[in-house]
Image (spheres, grey):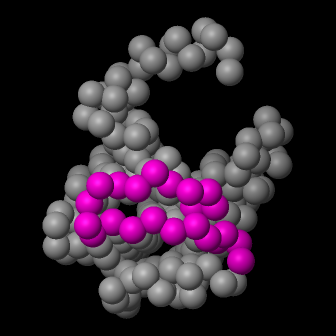
Amino acid sequence: MPNAWVKERKREYYYRKAKEEKFRSRASYKLLQAVKKHNFIKPGYVVVDLGASPGGWTQAARKLVDDSGFVLAVDLKPIEPVDAPNVRTIISDITEPKAIQDILEFLPRSADVVVSDVSPNISGIWELDHARQIDLASNSLRIATSILRSGGNFFVKVFQGNTLNNFVDEARQHFSFVKLVKPR
């Protein structure tokens, strides 16, 4: 990373706020803002966080479900454990069919919400990065439709690009309400 980029990042408001509030990433605020506006995670909910590393969305989801809910964080690589008895982390590849079974083994019941902040390793070639990210979002959708309770919620990060509309159309086949939101 260029030195100037790192210095600028450390001056950024949400970066500093995350450090002060002990969130692992500033992305926590993307989820918290979306939930505040659309109310899709509530106390007592079971939440599955796909692409959870480093754990910012997991921490935010834990805060939202309170002590009465449960959060399962899933990623390809180990995630530093969250110090809460109702949070579990597992290693699983969401592109593999086995991921659904891996997840179901740890859930106390069907999930109320699946969130996905999955991102590919960025190549810098936008068309390639977009295609890879939409593929990961589609895998997240496949998992969500397999583990969510009826009427459950799915929140996924997607990159803008030429196949986004196809992904949105696919999501509309499974959910009665689909909306694109952009956090501050």
For residue 131, which quarter of the picture?
Answer: bottom right
Residue placed at 66% from the left, 69% from the top? Answer: 93
Q: Position of residue 69 (x, y in %)?
A: 23, 72
**82 part of magenta stretch:** yes
Most foreground residue, 89 or 155: 89
Residue 164 in view (yes/no): no
> Left or right: 53 with respect to 42?
right
Residue placed at 26% from the left, 60% from the top? Answer: 84
Q: Position of residue 126 (x, y in %)?
A: 78, 41
Residue placed at 70% from the left, 51% from the top? Answer: 120
Residue 172, compared with residue 89, is above or below; it is below
Most foreground residue, 1 or 177: 1
Residue 86 in view (yes/no): yes
Q: Position of residue 51 (x, y in %)?
A: 55, 59
Boundaries of the magenta span = 75-96
Residue 132, compared with residue 160, is above or below; it is below
Q: Position of residue 104 (x, y in %)?
A: 48, 86
